[in-house]
Image (cartoon, helix red, strand yellow):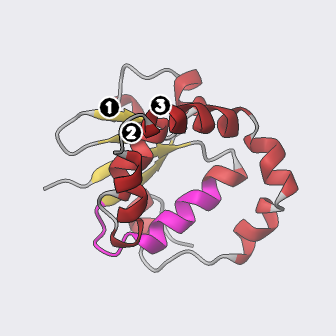
Amino acid sequence: MNPNTVLYDNECSFCTFQMKLLSWLDWGNRFALVPAADARVGVLAPDLTAEQLNEAIHCVTSDGRIHRGARAIRFISLRLPLLVPLALFLWLPGVILVAERVYALISRNRQLISGLFGCKGACALMPDRAGIGAKSGKAKP
C-alpha cells in the first residue's frame, strides 16, 4: 500500500521544521513528505493551486482523499502513536472548527513565528532522521 503523502511549503522554515518533527514521529513510515514546489504535486493533487498549497499543509491519503490544515493534522496525528491524544482531542465535537481558525491564524503569521522562535536556526540544528531523503523523495547528500 502506498503511504499517505504530506504536501508542505518548503520555503517556510517553520513548515520545514514541522516536517522534520513529523519524520521523527513517523516510526512506521506511513507518510511521504513532498515539498509543495515538487513536480509530483501536480500528479498527486492536480486540483490544488500554488496559493492553496502555501496556505496550509495538505495530506493526500493512499486512496486519493485530501485533508487540509487542522484536518490534515488530525488525520496525521491519528496514525502516529505519540500524537493519538491530539487526534482524539481534535475529534471532540466543535474542536476542529476552533482548530481550523487557530491553524489559519498561525499559517498567516508563520514567517513571523519562524523569526520569533528562531526556527531557521532550530531547523539547521535538528538532524534529519535516517531515511528522510527517501521519504521526501530527495536524494540524501
Pinpoint residue 22: horizontal percent, then vertical percent. Answer: 48, 64
- Looking at the rendering, the stretch of residues picked out in magenta corresponds to 16-30
Q: Which residue is mark 3?
A: 97
Q: Amino acid at mark 2?
A: Arg
Magenta span includes 23: yes
Q: Which residue is mark 1?
A: 43
C-beta proximity under 8 Å, tags 1 and 2: yes
Pinpoint residue 134: horizontal percent, then vertical percent. Answer: 39, 66
Whichever of callouts 3 and 2 sits on the residue coming sooner in the sequence is: 2
Quarter occupied by the C terminus: bottom right
Magenta span includes 51: no
Q: Amino acid at mark 1?
A: Val
In 3D space, how far apart are the residues under numbered discs 1 and 3 (Cα atoms)?
Answer: 30 Å
Pinpoint residue 140: horizontal percent, then vertical percent. Answer: 51, 71
Going by the image, does 82 lie left or right of 69?
A: left
Element marked by disc 3:
helix
Residue located at (53% from left, 59% from top):
19
